Amino acid sequence: MCGIVGLFDLKGRREFDRGLLSHLNDLQHHRGPDEGGLHLEPGVGFGHRRLSIIDLSSGQQPMFNGDGSVVIVFNGEIYNFQELMPELQALGYQFKTHSDTEVIIHAWEAWGEACVERLRGMFAFAIWDRKRQTLFLARDRLGVKPLYYAWLPDGTLAFSSELKSISAHPVFDKTLDPMSIEDYFAYGYIPEPRTVFMGALKLEPGHTLTVPRGCTTMPSPREYWDIPFKPLGAISEQEAQEEMVRRLRESVKIRMVAEVPLGAFLSGGVDSSAVVAMMAGLSEGPVNTCSISFGDPKFNEAEFAQQVAQRYHTNHYVEQVDPDDFSLLDKLAGMYDEPYADSSALPTYRVCQLARKHVTVALSGDGGDENVAGYRRYRFHLGEEKLRSALPLSVRRPLFGTLGTLYPKADWAPRVFRAKSTFEALARDSVEGYFHAISIFKTPMRAKLYTPKFMAELGGYHAINTMMRHADRAPTDHPLSLVQYLDMKTYLVGDILTKVDRASMANSLEVREPLLDHQWMEWLSGLPPELKLKGGEGKYILKKALEPYLPNDILYRQKMGFAVPLAGWFRGPLKQKVRDALLGETLAQTGWFNRDYLLELITHHEKGIRDYSAPLWTLLMFESFLRNCLGSETRRAVEAA
């Protein structure tokens, strides 16, 4: 796992300043503390920070082909590189190292842009081919590894693993993108391909970007992979269970190759426990497992993690997190470089911090909820879909729209009485309803939050446009498969994978996700949806397949999640901090937010009238971003928008 950065002169062959490139590279030192390397030639500058995992003695980057005409900087791991190496040798390519990086170089020489279709793993890389006078950028299929790029005003294309190494360039324009801000307050993160800045983009998962020297307009990225959701042939439930375990074991096995200490996160949930169970069966010695515990039993899964650790005799490391551990609040802004509002980033950082004390590589269970329908919202969505199919939208919209308006918001009541959101969702079509369900600030709330000034800057843009774009090209129209697909395109990459990448890299830890193997996901997407969510049980087929490996109180207990006690914080130790941040100068100087509504959110939450912890956290993280990442530049960045 590493950090990459680069500068490319689109117009000519300017000499880039070595000191500047070194500075941009060193901003990502945490991603690769073991080694750093630079390469400069007329019109090209590449930088690399290395966290050594494989081929420790000879895998340094930037790396070159035999005649020096091709150079690469690469972040990630290619799990099938040992299979590709003899194939490339048969084509006449000679290897000087035993690294996956050199395999990518020769794959590019042999197959050009199609090389990515042969790679199995997580990756973001840049190749400069002097003979072809071409820069080639690529990102893995699921977006496990990040890649940002920007066309700077001086004709330079800049790219990096983290946005901080682009935004620190002296000619980068830090104008904020109002559409990204609208997305942020709906989703809690900024979905691909946008960033918080108008001048920078994320290369979307499963895409490449080919940039020939001398181009006058930025080429469009090319998609090389998408989740197919292509139905499998006839398969029995028993066959599906057996194949699932075989594929899961193989996906875990190829991720256990490392020349450094390796372990796993173990939360006590189904997904991480499944990964540990497979690792234990493949490992000659005890597996290293890491968990964090919470003092509050509502958030604590430590006893379930301990069950799995005892069953498989792991070397289990546990640390308890202070239930009032909010010391990382401002640090998060610097880690994520743009607004990011998933509060589970706090415990995720802590478990990465713990893991790094014992291992350099950790396997995680990320991706299981999206792949096998583990989220409770999928069950609610299918229930709403049955009602939608019974009544046309022309009837539902006025009927349930009125009920949604009149019905009180009852956060304090049992779930059966909290019907307001359900009514509001039923008044919408399927995608609109799902967007409403997952939004942090619902559409009516954002209408109250924004000032007329900000609404004018949006120019009619609405955050649902992002979800509609993916829905319009989805390869499935099954109600469950469609929302899984939407989550894979938005929430999985924008929230989950972003969280894990930044938290792990901030601690110089490599995280590998067996449940996000693209071959595993292709197969899973083709399984009948009824095997994923059956009888109200999410992850049905995965849980059935794992019954020989895990106890039922791990498999079938209620999903807990990796949460922190925000509601109590904002009525107690962080009460004044929230007031100071949301009603202070930083947000006020943007001119984008209605102060009266901010005060209403704070007051109603403090009095217990409503639980506004998620919206308040979202605002708190936005204020922290402005203050910590922009500082005195905030007003200029806002006014330019």
Image (spheres, rainbow, N blue to C red):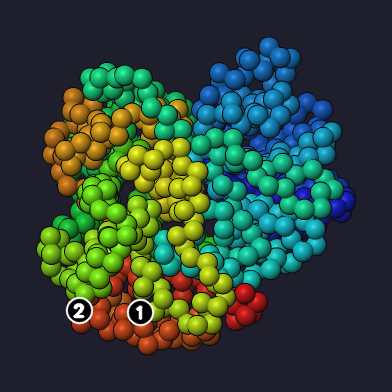
Q: Dot 2, how many residues are within 10 Å of its Cα: few (below 14), some (14-19), or many (20+)?
A: some
Q: How many marks?
A: 2
Q: Residue at x 57, y 75 (%)?
A: 457
Distance Cα–Cα, label 2 vs label 1: 17 Å
| Residue 549 rendering spot, x and y as whole percentages | 21, 27
334 left or right of 277 in image: right
The numbered dot on residue 44 is none
The numbered dot on residue 578 is 1
Nearer-N-terminus badge (2/1): 1
Q: Where the C terminus falls, by quadrant? A: bottom right
| Residue 103 rendering spot, x and y as whole percentages | 64, 26
Front residue of 529/572: it is 529
| Residue 562 rendering spot, x and y as whole percentages | 29, 53
Q: Which three-letter amino acid code belongs to the residue tagged 2? A: Ile
Q: Where the N terminus falls, by quadrant? A: top right
The numbered dot on residue 609 is 2
Label 1: which secondary element = helix
Label 2: which secondary element = loop
Q: Residue at x 24, y 65 (%)?
A: 399
Q: Dot 1, how many residues are within 10 Å of its Cα: few (below 14), some (14-19), or many (20+)?
A: many
Query: Which picture quadrant has residue 608?
Result: bottom left
Residue 101 visible in the snapshot: yes
